[in-house]
Image (cartoon, rainbow, N blue to C red):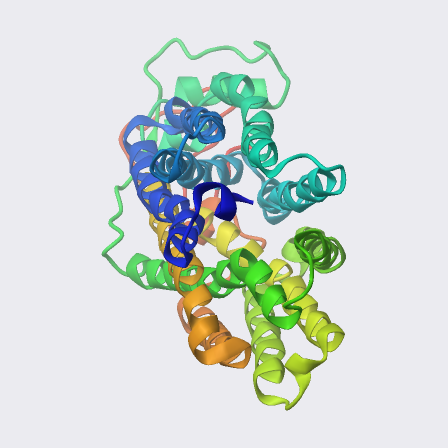
Amino acid sequence: LLTPIFNLSTNQISLLNSISLLASVVGAMTFGKLMDRLGRKRMYGVEVTILVVGALLSALSWNFTSLLIFRVIVGLGVGGDYATSAVITAEYANRRSRGRLIGTVFAMQGFGLLAGPLIASIFLATGVSNGVAWRLMLALGAVPAASVIYLRRKIRETPRFTLAVKGDADTTAETLRWTLGEGDAAPRATQPAPVAVALRARLTSKPFLKRLIGTAGAWFLLDIAYYGNSVSSPLILKTLQPNGSLLNHTLISLAIFAVAALPGYWVAVALLDKLGRKRIQIQGFLMMFLAFFVIALVPGVTNKVWVFLMLFAVSYFFVEFGPNMTTFVYPSEIFPTSIRGAGDGISAAAGKFGAFLGALFVPHLLNSIGIRGVMAVMGTVSIVGALLTRFALPEPMGLTLEESSGEIYEPVVASAPPAGVTSATNETELHH
């Protein structure tokens, strides 16, 4: 839509597609670190406010440069949301349904990704001018984000952070009573809160460095393939159907996402706590590898549009029922509370950097090595992701957050805890 309005070159299109992803690298790392330092509550809602401001300003852009700057603001908010949402959900969840709860948070993005091409198709079909349509689409992106700002700002600090990092058992007990709907039924402690404070971990120490390489590396590799394909899908369709209209290409993209990708999110949500994160991530990478290499190596596949699209859809399904879901879930579960935000933020940042590279270079690769060459690159990336998952990541399914993260506690007051707080040990969950 923007190409004829701003007279964009191929390089400018690539930069617009990728700049918010690069900004999200900064957003994820910044918010992840601040969550560990200032607390989850103080940062939750700030990131989505930044996103809303950036989206609204983007809709008011007057040239390429202004739009580029405003998309940077959007990216900062998006990156911050990746780091905050998973961690807060994980720290409030119980071990039996933690995967389903974190996965549900992530799966909601599927409806947003479906809404984008759907709204674009409606605008194109009803004759809304391109000059108005792109502004409306960018402005509408702020609506769902704006709707949650108030609720996010009202959420309480997670019990795990107040106990493990702050050593505040009174506040932990109060939050647990609120979470469990018990009001003020349980008495508050009249003595200083007994507490076992989690020893501060380092991401560079074993086994956390290995885990960080696994989570950040897998997310980086996944997003090269995922964003490279999804952001560049209009260009891929144009290569397959050079005479197809923009509306036709948009509808095909919408159909592929609705039929293949969206169900993949919810199949993953249903099975995360049954099959495990590791199995789903490995099988997803392997199926992506197979689909991409069939397209790359079987003669004539790229000449048969519907055969190609079916294989493309298969890869899309196993991206969602696979590493696109699990790379979001994993980092929030396998790092101790004191570095959970940083571990999640760095992992998300690595993913968004991979997405930046995919979105930036896939259009150029299409021109230089063609669709089959691009699919071979994506297949190679996918098999490396499967191997990295196999050797670098543990399975957190069925474990408490303390067990799966290797949390180590150091008692500082030897007395009974207040009502509502159990002893903090490696084997204990806070009423979960």
Rendered position, 412 above or below 330: above
Rendered position, 251 above or below 361: above
- Tell me residue 68's x, y (percent): 37, 40
Judge left or right: residue 285 versus residue 195: right
Q: Residue furthest bottom?
A: 299
The part of the image, by quadrant, that contains residue 76 is: top left
Judge left or right: residue 148 versus residue 268: left
- Tell me residue 213's x, y (percent): 34, 63
Q: Where, quadrant-wise, is the N terminus in this rendering?
A: top right
Which residue lies at the image location 69% right of the left edge and 62% below the top edge? 244
Q: Where, quadrant-wise, is the C terminus in this rendering?
A: top right
Residue 336 visible to an observer of this rendering: no
Please tell me which residue lies in front, 299 or 123: 123
Residue 350 visible to an observer of this rendering: yes
Which residue lies at the image location 58% right of the left edge and 77% below the top edge? 292
- Tell me residue 408's x, y (percent): 33, 46
- Tell me residue 225's x, y (percent): 49, 66
Please tell me which residue lies in front, 180 or 422: 180
Please give the count of numbered marks on the rendered protein: 0
Which residue lies at the image location 70% right of the left edge and 70% below the top edge? 309
Judge left or right: residue 141 versus residue 165: right
Which residue lies at the image location 75% right of the left edge and 42% below the top edge? 125
Rendered position, 129 above or below 175: below
